[in-house]
Image (spheres, rainbow, N blue to C red):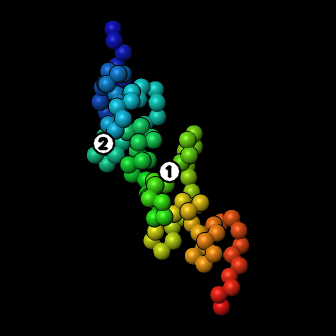
Amino acid sequence: MERILRATGKAYHPHCFTCVVCQRSLDGIPFTVDAANHIHCIEDFHKKFAPRCCVCSEPIMPAPGQEETVRIVALDRDFHVQCYRCEVCIYSVTAVRCVSTVV
């Protein structure tokens, strides 16, 4: 008898239970579903739905092997921590203290 995988209230052949974006089999792999109940691998879900940094336009998503990330929200804009910079001296606000000569 063939093995059947049950997820999202439905039955699947293990090789048919795949990410809608990359088509990778999700048998035994963490997954998530979007609002339309489409199945995604975690990486593709973050790529598709994560907020985008207003500086580099890349998605703000966890580093490989991590489950969470930090983002900075300022003036209704999203930033990677490393992209958030002082507008006067352009150094990272999180890394060094700004010394401005502007009065």
Left or right position of 77 against 13 = right
Labels 1 & 2 near each other (Cβ < 8 A): no
Q: Name the residue under label 1.
A: 61
- Image position of 61 with respect to 84: above or below: above
**Residue lying farthest to the top in this orientation:** 1
* Residue 29 screen position, x and y as percent: 46, 30
Viewer-nearest residue: 63 or 31: 63
- Image position of 102 with respect to 69: above or below: below
Left or right position of 103 against 36 = right
Task: For label 2, count other residues whose C-alpha is less than 10 Å away and answer few (under 14), some (14-19) or many (20+).
Answer: few
Disc sitting over residue 37 in the figure? 2
Circle 1: element type: loop
Left or right position of 94 against 63 = right
| Mark nearer the viewer, 1 or 2 | 1
Tag 1: amino acid: Met
- Identify the residue at horizontal 29%, vertical 30% (top origin): 10
Circle 2: element type: loop
* Residue 13 screen position, x and y as percent: 32, 21
Q: In which quarter of the image is the C terminus?
A: bottom right
* Residue 57 screen position, x and y as percent: 44, 59
Quarter of the rendering containing residue 11: top left
Disc with the residue nearer the chain's start (1 vs 2): 2
- Identify the residue at horizontal 51%, vertical 71% (top origin): 74
- Image position of 39 with respect to 86: above or below: above
Tag 2: amino acid: Asn
